[in-house]
Amino acid sequence: MEWENAVTRAYDTRLALISPPRTGSTAVARLLWQHPRVTHHCHEPFEACYWGDQGPESVAGVLRNPMVVASGERIALADVERGSGLLMKEMSFQLSEAQFTQLVGLATAPPVFVICDPRLSTTSRLRIVRELNGAHTFPPFESGWQSLREQVELCRARDIPYVLVDSDDMRADPAGVTAALITAVGLPQAGGLENWTPRPGLKLVSPEVGALMSDVRKADDPFYRKVLGSSGIQPRGAVDWEREEAAIAAAGLEDDVAKWRHWYEEMRADPALIAGRHTERENNAHTG
């Protein structure tokens, strides 16, 4: 496709970031924005295909109009300076196999998969859908875990290198995990990427696309409110696991989350996982 050729011509660096919802992937994206090589961002280019049954033209529309990281302005692809860098962020469940292949094919680095404990991503999504629609649960497929597992397996089957980042590892060791991530995607090291200036007014999703899921997103998108108002990677506070698991059970997702946790633990044992202090403590506990 001509627009794909235009994307590859415009950017020397093209990164793909894929995750289940509510795993901390936008925080990882914000961190990558801090790198001087990452100048532009395309947010969930396949979102309108999933929520609005729109076709490839909607994907092309997002990628032809990237957001300038420094200003938040969207510009025409033709106006992107040669040698720029693009971050393409997408939710795992919004991608068909063909779309995943297309996205990864545009990247110049291994795709980055962001994960966290599925209990926490589930209860976070439950809080969001309650705010958006008054819903008390969501379809298990939209957790993103099934799609993510299939995408990781696809990479293995096709010998596509990939990177796994657990956002809780990043919270526990921001500098160490950030440095390892930057190396894994082939960028030169740069200090202080894990801290940034709050940008609460930034619009990652156009109102018309956000409204495909809920009208609430037109005014104040709850998916990104916290991370855009943040100033960097922060430690996770204490978790009341009994409360989280009670919320999961009340939503009828107990069996699903048990399955997702099994897949998550498999991913945490994957050599592609970037190690931090959290990971090292786990490894020491298993070998000690």
Image (tube, grey):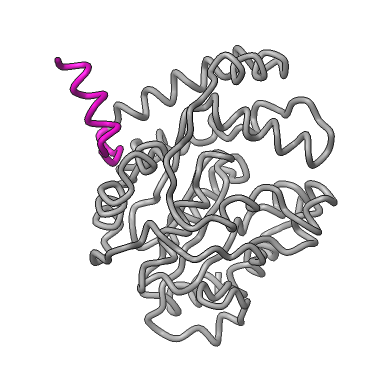
Q: Position of residue 234 (x, y in %)?
A: 44, 46
In this view, the residue farthest toward the left is: 288
Q: Look at the image and tell me in which quarter the N terminus lies.
A: bottom right
In this picture, is 137 found above or below 36? above
Image quarter for residue 240?
top right
The residue that appears at 51% across and 22% down in the rendered structure is 260
Image quarter for residue 73?
bottom right
- The number of numbered discs placed on residues in the rendered structure image is 0
Q: Look at the image and tell me in which quarter the C terminus lies.
A: top left
In this rendering, position of residue 40 left or right of residue 176? right
The residue that appears at 84% across and 33% down in the rendered structure is 134
Q: Main secondary structure of the magenta part?
A: helix
Question: Magenta stretch: residue 284 in it?
Answer: yes
Q: Which residues are magenta?
A: 271-288
Q: Position of residue 268 (x, y in %)?
A: 34, 29
Question: Magenta stretch: residue 258 in it?
Answer: no
The residue that appears at 39% across and 51% down in the rendered structure is 111
The residue that appears at 25% across and 50% down in the rendered structure is 180
In this picture, is 253 found above or below 42? above
Q: Position of residue 282 (x, y in %)?
A: 26, 24
In this view, the residue farthest toward the front is: 238
Instruction: Choose between 178 and 20: the one closer to the eye.
Output: 178
Q: Position of residue 31 (x, y in %)?
A: 42, 58
